[in-house]
Image (tube, rainbow, N blue to C red):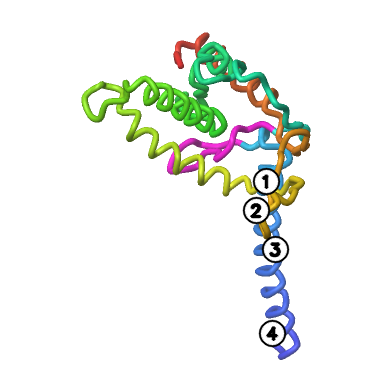
Amino acid sequence: MTNVSIWLMAILAVTAVYQSVDLGLKKRLARQIDRVLSPETIEYSYTNGDRPHQLPVQLSQVALTVEWLDDEVYGLYADDDWESLFPFGRSGFVTLGPNQDHFAVGMYHQLHCLDVFRISYAAARAHALVYPGNGTHFDNHFAHCMNYIREMLLCNADPTLIPAKPTGTEGRYISRSIGVTHQCRDWTQLRQWVEKNMMEANRTGAIL
């Protein structure tokens, strides 16, 4: 075998390895892109950690302009208003995969924590928040939820600019969020997906 043949075979071997690696990287990149653009098309085994980390739905972008609501709307004692935030007035769990594994949805877990704040504050105002012994343990739950909401606010890192005005004290400003528009993911679309999933789970016997 001549030196030319050896070099040619070596070049072909290197090229084959490169193409194999390149193809693998492209497939991996395509899967990552699909997870973002078409999450509903990705298949998972639901074994050994192979599962989605978000609901398989592409949420649209919507705008939310902050309003000053009446104190009674989503107020401290507005149980029905707060219950209406959850699908079918319940907690917002879903089932996924062939074994109908149960998952909580992040948005509803965060709303649940806000509801814990509300109930804890109402109980504290009524001097009904006893530690320990009242069976609610809202004080421990409150501490968990406060840290969880802090982490979720940091995670979402809302970059919306809120106008600020001087307070009259040197170097101090106050911001007013009323009327400010934020860019959001469509929470109604998320709710529709969760409700559809819950109805299917009830139909198949995986009660949520």
Q: Residue at x 72, y 27 (%)?
A: 67
Q: Residue at x 72, y 72 (%)?
A: 15
For marks 3 and 1, the one nearer the N-term is: 3
Element class at badge 3 = helix
Q: Name the residue carrying label 2.
A: 28
Q: CA distance from mark 3 to mark 2?
A: 10 Å
Q: Nearer the viewer, residue 197 or 10?
A: 197
Amino acid type at image mark 3: Asp
Q: Which mark is residue 34?
A: none
Give the left or right position of residue 184, taking residue 119 as reference: right
Amino acid type at image mark 4: Ile
User: What x and y, as percent, mark residue 19?
Assistant: 71, 65
Residue 201 against residue 17 in the figure, above or below? above
The overriding secondary structure of the stretch rendered in magenta is loop
C-beta proximity under 8 Å, tags 3 and 1:
no
Q: Nearer the viewer, mark 2 or mark 4?
A: 2
For marks 4 and 3, the one nearer the N-term is: 4
Q: Can residue 190 be seen? A: yes
Q: Name the residue carrying label 3.
A: 22
Q: Which mark is residue 158?
A: 1
Q: CA distance from mark 4 to mark 3?
A: 24 Å
User: What x and y, as percent, mark residue 21?
Assistant: 65, 64
- Magenta stretch bounds: 43-57
Q: Nearer the viewer, mark 3 or mark 1?
A: 1
Q: Nearer the viewer, mark 1 or mark 2?
A: 1
C-beta proximity under 8 Å, tags 2 and 4:
no
Q: Does the magenta run of residues contain 60?
A: no
Q: Name the residue carrying label 4.
A: 6
Element class at badge 4 = helix
For marks 2 and 4, the one nearer the N-term is: 4
In which quadrant of the rendered view does residue 52 lie? top right
Crowding at dot 4, Cα within 10 Å, few <14 / some 14-19 / many 20+, comes out as: few
